[in-house]
Image (cartoon, grey):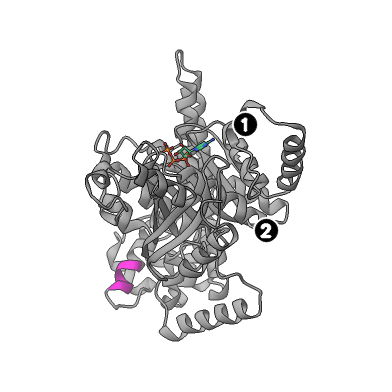
Amino acid sequence: MTAALSQIHNVEAEQALLGAIFMDNASFGIAHSIVRPEHFYEPIHSRIFEMCGEMILEGRAATPVTLKTKLPADLDIAGMTPSQYMARLMAEATPAITLPDYARTVRDAWAARCVEEASRNVASEVAAPGANVKSAIASHLADLDRIRAEIDDRRVARQPLATCLSEVLLRVDAIREGRMEPGATTGLSDLDRMMGGLQPGRLVIVAGRPGMGKTIVGANIARATAAAGNGCLLFSLEMPSEEIGARILSDQAFRHGSPITSKAIFEGHLDARQMQDVEKSASDLAGLNLLIDTSAGLSVGEILARTRSAADEMKARGARLRVVVIDYLKFVRASDRYRGQRVYEVGEITAGLKALAKDLGVCVVLLAQLNRAVEQRADKRPELSDLRESGDIEADADVVLLLFREAYYLKDKADPDSMARLLACENALEIIIAKCRMGAVGVVETFCHPGASAVRDRGTGGYGR
Ligand SMILES: Nc1ncnc2c1ncn2[C@@H]1O[C@H](COP(=O)(O)OP(=O)(O)OP(=O)(O)O)[C@@H](O)[C@H]1O
């Protein structure tokens, strides 16, 4: 991105930043974590910053004296030789304590120039005859998002072990004193205990065969975590809002012995008592910080932009976005980079969502479909290797949950043994924790009523009721 015509710049901040680096070469690392050579408006400043980096990396001092031989002696910089110009920068330098501010000023001016250029480009693109306005907007949003990502301060990745450990202890204190939650709840206490809840920065995959209950589990997590006070954003990329809304309502209204199906709600087949229950559930849900986005075919960049805006919207209301549920992987649009090469496309999507989780400090719950391999085995319980399309899903995920309902394979069988078995297990849903970076692998047995879209701890339901 270049911005040759732009007048947005702050040459004084560029000079002050370089002067501060000359004064104290040790501060270069801080400057470098914020600003890059191409962020400078003046080409000579960009070159001086680059040379400082090269010298310091070689373990040599970067000063006007050591750098002057690297620039043509007859170069004219505002009427001065390179040597005179750099000496002036150093003489007028201010304390290193203000260096991060100068660095951010330089970088933000660069970002403003980029925004200006991108906006100019999109304006002329949409004005052209036959323009594809929708695609121009999408690519403009992606451009803006890339610029925004650049101006997020890159975290210092290298630190002494002692600093790292003191951060761990601060976290322990905060959790013990109730100032920090260890992870947002999934609504299922056994699952929370085993995987430590929905931790910020994590990518959690919920995978299963078609119709196994991925949407049921995803919508349950969204409702339950929001009910516990966590901000949640649910991307329903496949299902329209009336349908996902009906599922969340039937889940909220669920009572053992008198479930109301999401189908009955969707089709309006409710008696007076059910209508009362549904209205009460709707009013209970109304105050939750749960946003539902039903746009189709979103890219990772668009999901990122919408998640940021949802986080800002919640922040303005005094809430914090903690969980993002995406239903489901197949409907996330990949870039054109690997067009048609699904393995790479999936890798790009899962890596992008993992980065989103880390950057925004949220837990991303991504629903995904399992391939048919599981159907060929005698034991139909899924395994990690059944994850469709790519090993990258497994590699990028912090947690992989695989869904298994035995009833799924029994419902079409007519022999007495299968029918008896179906009766015994019709509400059993196994959540197999197949991978868990910071917790235990194993199986969590839950109660599931697919018609009412409800999942509960097994202890609060019991099978077959
Ligand atoms: N009224 C109902 N009574 C009984 N079962 C129902 C009812 N409504 C839905 N179901 C069952 O619930 C399951 C739907 O679950 P869900 O939509 O969560 O599956 P999924 O894994 O997300 O599927 P897909 O991959 O096809 O989107 C299906 O097996 C369906 O048969």
Q: Is residue 292 left or right of residue 387?
A: right
Which labelled disc corresponds to residue 460? none
The reply to whether residue 41 is in sight is no
Which quadrant is the N terminus positioned in? top left
Q: Is mark 2 within 8 Å of ligand 1?
A: no
Q: Residue at x 29, y 53 (%)?
A: 392
Crowdedness near tag 2: few (<14), some (14–19) or many (≥20) residues, C-alpha within 10 Å = some
Q: Residue at x 36, y 58 (%)?
A: 47
Where residue 15 appears, as percent x and y from the top left, is 50, 62
User: Which of the two residues, 262 or 319, is positioned nearer the viewer here?
Assistant: 262
User: Which of the two residues, 247 or 160, is positioned nearer the viewer here?
Assistant: 247
Which labelled disc corresponds to residue 264? 1
Q: Is mark 1 within 8 Å of ligand 1?
A: yes
**Type of residue at label 1?**
Ala
Q: Is residue 256 magenta?
A: no
Q: Secondary structure at mark 1?
A: helix
Q: Residue at x 41, y 36 (%)?
A: 331
Q: Is residue 20 left or right of residue 391?
A: right
Q: Which residue is mark 2?
A: 229
Label 2 – label 1 distance at C-alpha: 29 Å
Along the polypeptide, which appears first: circle 2 or circle 1? 2
Examine the image and state in which quarter residue 318 appears. Answer: bottom right
Specify start and end residues of the magenta stretch as a single range.
Answer: 53-57
Residue 335 against residue 27 in the figure, above or below: above
The reply to whether residue 172 is in sight is yes
Q: Is residue 56 magenta?
A: yes
Residue 186 against residue 90 in the figure, above or below: above
